[in-house]
Image: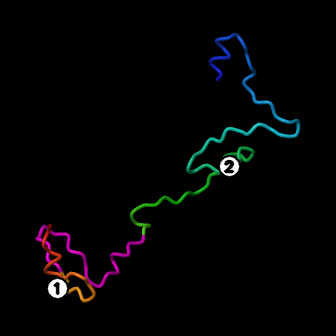
Amino acid sequence: GMMLDEASGVHRSQEPILPAGLQAPKTIISSWNRRSNDTSKKHKTQTFRLLQAKNIVRPQLKFKEKIDNTNTPFVPKIFIKPNAQKPLPESKDLP
């Protein structure tokens, strides 16, 4: 690697050798709210929409039966498994 070359006294240029028509790739500085290569335009203000709690669609609000998040014990709503290989009372028993 590079450290062995430096230790042996061989100094290589840090830039890779490219054909005449190609340019070295630019370092990409990423940011979630920055447009690419808009530096020529004078910092125009743009509006960004953030995902906040009021913007997110909540499908659970459309449920027919509302979710109960109280501290009451769990009560199963199904009592029969019509297409099951094991009936429900057997599947409740833990191994």
Please state the horizontal and vertical placement of residue 57, each as a whole percent of the image: 42, 72
Q: Residues within 10 Å of mark 2 (few under 14, many from 20)?
A: few
Q: Report the residue at 62% width, 52% height from top.
A: 45
Residue identifier under label 1: 79
| Left or right: 82 as drawn, with respect to 18 | left
**Residue type highlighted by circle 1:** Phe
Q: Does the stretch in magenta take in 25?
A: no
> For residue 36, which numbered disc appears in the image?
2
Q: Which of pointers 2 and 1 lies earlier in the amino acid sequence? A: 2
Would you place residue 57 above or below residue 26 in this image?
Answer: below
Locate residue 6, reporting x and y percent. 66, 14
Is most of the magenta stretch helix, strand or loop?
loop
Residue in the image at 11% along x and 70% along y:
72
Looking at this view, name the residue that lies furthest to the right: 20
Task: Provide the residue span drawn in magenta.
Answer: 57-76
Check whether the beta carbons of the residues at disc 2 and disc 1 lie within 8 A of each other. no
Q: Can you say whether 82 is above or below 11 in the image?
A: below
Secondary structure at numbered mark 2: loop
Label 1 element class: loop
* Res 64 label: none
**Residue 84, picture quadrant:** bottom left
Name the spot of residue 4 as percent of width and height, x first: 64, 17
Q: Is residue 54 left or right of residue 41?
A: left
Tell me what residue is drawn at x 72 percent, y 24 percent. 14
Q: In this rendered view, identify the residue nearer to me: 19 or 52.
A: 19
Q: CA distance from mark 2 to mark 1?
A: 58 Å
Q: Is residue 50 left or right of residue 18?
A: left
Residue at point 13%, 80% (across, down): 89
Mark 2 residue type: Ser
